[in-house]
Amino acid sequence: MSPADPDEEGRGPRVSRRVFLGAAGAAGLVGATGGVALGTSLHGTDAPAPTPERIPFHGANQAGIATAFQHNLNFAAFDVTTEDSGELRDLLRAWTYAASRLCSGLPVGPVEGPPAAPPVDTGEAVGLPPSRLTVTFGFGPTLFERHGVDRFGLRRLRPEPLVDIPPMPGDALDPSRSGGDIGVQACADEPQVAFHVVRTLARMGRRVVAMRWSQVGFGRTSSAGHHDPTPRNLQGFKDGTNNIGIGDQALLARDVWVGAADSPAWMRGGTYQVVRRIRMFIETWDRSALREQQETIGRHKLSGAPLGGAQEFDAVNLNALGSDGKPVIPLDAHIRLAGPTVNEGVRILRRGYSFTEGIDARTGELDAGLFFVCFQRDPRRQFIPIQQRLASTDALNEYIMHEGSAIFAIPPGVATGHFVGEALFGSV
Ligand code: HEM
């Protein structure tokens, strides 16, 4: 590769090698020899042409939100350990550049270099396709203020919608699976590609950030629109039927993207992400009768049709009464309580993944469930009131438990040559 390191669109360099290596070097990525030149051979991995395998990293909005849903997730929450906002800014610049390369299927640097230094790229994604990789960055409330301390001079720039999520009935939140200063969501069809992102960013961030928790997910639990077959969650139900379609620009503009007149200005084109690690009591669910499962959700298991309907995408009729005079979709059914009819019309974009992590040693039961991920324009009007309603009356509560929780402000997308959150850090 020439010294003119191409970006993933194949144009010339916008982030200089010096900047990348400077930040990466500060973060410990570059070996003791003082640096492995990024411009040396990457073994023929020139900037690839766009393909269906590749989702562009750059754009008005960050990818990984209203872009095609991939099959695997690797999510990491980091705490910032430095007190120097300059170091943090340099790391974000280096992370942005690294993410743009990874999304193109390029290594972050040579996988072979001086024998006495660790390779810049760890190599496990070499030879794998870009796998529709997306890397989405977000900022948690504690980045703006922690224990009353304005750590990086960002307090006055904290968005009002970036609230701490209030405690909900039934919460069993584990602090070691919750919160975080920075969230990184890596999604790809190939799990090793998503893993490579989190590993690489953590490695680059040494001495500036520390990983607080991470979550691996598989089998996306949301569809991206009616053209996309709806996947099933671990309860065996189609999940994502009544989701916001990623092609529905009007709904995305209304309910997901921070608008041109919204404050703060640095968030325009961004969104807010809420993640919840929700454990499913699979064994209890598997012992419950089909009728009970369907009435819990409010839909038929196999077809995904709403109770009272015949096809998956039939309209949900919350007013229909059965021959016994009772609502066909019970008053505590999940889709009644989560849907827009009872929630003042608001909707959220769901983008969750299933997880399984062996056995819960305390109970001998499967540690499995839903890593719930949603995006919205204002969590105070969207996730929080919906979840308050669900937490107090949803029939599903008998079968689930919320164990982890985090919220992140997702800044807008990045133009070539810029870095994620630049408008925020440019204001301090
Ligand atoms: C383990 C926990 C959960 C499971 C198993 C689950 C499962 C489901 C299923 C099977 C559907 C019906 C298909 C669909 O329209 O997507 C659904 C719908 C929905 N869920 Fe969940 N869900 C869970 C947690 C949540 C949470 C925490 C929220 C938000 C706070 C939520 C919000 C929604 C919404 C908004 C809908 C669409 C309702 C409609 O408009 O018809 N879900 N969920």
Image (cartoon, rainbow, N blue to C red):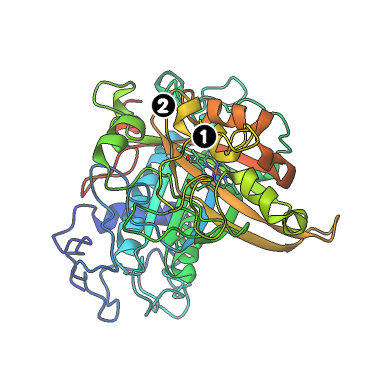
Q: Mark 1 sits on what residue?
A: 320
Q: How many marks?
A: 2
Snapshot quadrant of residue 188: bottom left
Q: Position of residue 229 (x, y in %)?
A: 39, 61
* Earlier sequence position, callout 1 versus callout 2: 1
* Rendered residue at 25%/40% (across/down): 249
Q: Residues within 10 Å of mark 1 (few under 14, many from 20)?
A: some
Residue 140: x percent and y percent? 50, 34
Q: Where is the C terminus found, in terms of image quarters?
A: top left
Where 291 falls versus 171 (above or below)? below
Q: Is residue 156 above or below residue 338?
A: above
- The reply to whether discs 1 and 2 touch (Cβ–Cβ < 8 Å) is no
The reply to whether residue 277 is visible in this rendering is no
- As helix, strand or loop, the secondary structure at mark 1 comes to loop
Q: Nearer the viewer, residue 1 or 236?
A: 236
Q: Is residue 76 left or right of residue 404?
A: left
As drawn, the label of residue 237 is none
For the point 18% across and 69% down, which residue is it?
49
What element does badge 2 sit on?
loop
- Nearer the observer: mark 1 or 2; the answer is 1
282 lies left or right of 122? right
State the residue position of label 2: 345
Q: Nearer the viewer, residue 77 or 301?
A: 301
Q: Nearer the viewer, residue 175 or 69?
A: 69
> What type is the residue that disc 1 sits on?
Ala
Residue drawn at the location 39% of the way across and 77% of the way down: 126
